[in-house]
Amino acid sequence: MTPPPTPRTTRTTRTTRTTRNRRADARRSRTSILDGAIRLLNDRPDASVEAIAAAAGVTRQTVYAHFPSREQLLTAVLDRLTERTVAAMAAADPDSGPPAEALLRVLDAAEQTAGAYPALVRLLGTLPVSPPDDAERHAPVTALLERVVRRGQASGDFDDRLPTDWLVTATIALAHAASEQVEGGRLSPRQARDTLRISVLRLLGAE
């Protein structure tokens, strides 16, 4: 028969449970703040911390507890939006079907996710980000694209005479260029999408 817990064991268990609950609450608060900031800052890029707190359903003090400065908050928002984009790209099933179709699905998923927040993306583009930090943040994006490109090179659908890393880097640069053309009013979203598709397929030797 198992002996009853001692008072010390009971206190330790309660302390552990309380700590877990606090951590879970903190994670929920952080997620609420970032999701609220994404929604609000796309409509009001100059929104105050107070407004962001209200949109997230938390107090201003809670926002500052997680993000002591506005720049830290915006950096975390950039990370959150990148995570959403990566999740959408992964959900586009990059490992199935003809490589060219898979690559276009992945690029469309990225555009539809990040492209839904044009004002926010412009705001986040003003953040001072070092090249190593930017590369680390976008490593999952690069890895997804690399999988598709390597698969296409192995199957003969894509040109294998150029390094995979180069093709992936060039594809990302073309995607950024398409986004900039839309922001500058030089292309409509549809024109930019079609132009990007043609350019990427030609780059990879798939057209």
Image (tube, grey):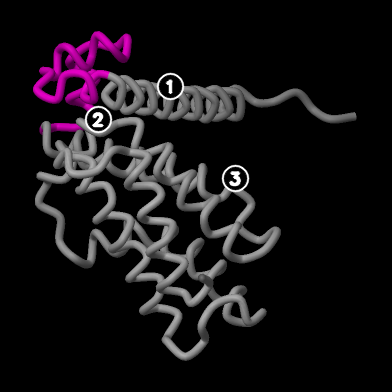
Q: Earlier in the sequence, mark 2 or mark 3?
A: 2
Dot 3 falls on a residue whose secondary structure is: helix
Would residue 83 appear left or right of 129 to someone viewing this image?
Answer: right
The residues bearing labels 2 and 3 have C-alpha atoms spaced at a distance of 30 Å
Query: Would you place residue 142 above or below residue 118 in this image?
Result: below
Q: Is residue 66 magenta?
A: yes
Give the image quarter of residue 164: bottom left
Single out the mark in the foreground, 1 or 3.
Answer: 3
Dot 2 falls on a residue whose secondary structure is: helix
Residue 84: x, y in percent? Answer: 44, 39
Near-viewer residue (147 or 112): 112
Q: Which mark is residue 91?
A: 3
Residue type at mark 2?
His
Q: Main secondary structure of the magenta part?
A: helix
The residues bearing labels 1 and 3 have C-alpha atoms spaced at a distance of 28 Å
The residues bearing labels 1 and 2 have C-alpha atoms spaced at a distance of 12 Å
Would residue 26 appear left or right of 127 to someone viewing this image?
Answer: right
Near-viewer residue (159 or 83): 159
Which quadrant does the N terminus fall into? Answer: top right
Q: Is residue 123 magenta?
A: no
In the image, what residue occupies the spot 36% across and 45% down?
Answer: 82
User: Tags 1 and 3 in contact by the CB under 8 Å rule?
Assistant: no
In the image, what residue occupies the spot 9% across and 22% down?
Answer: 46
Near-viewer residue (138 or 180): 180
Magenta residues (range): 40-69
Residue type at mark 1?
Asp
Q: Which mark is residue 66?
A: 2
User: Tags 1 and 2 in contact by the CB under 8 Å rule?
Assistant: no
Residue type at mark 3?
Ala
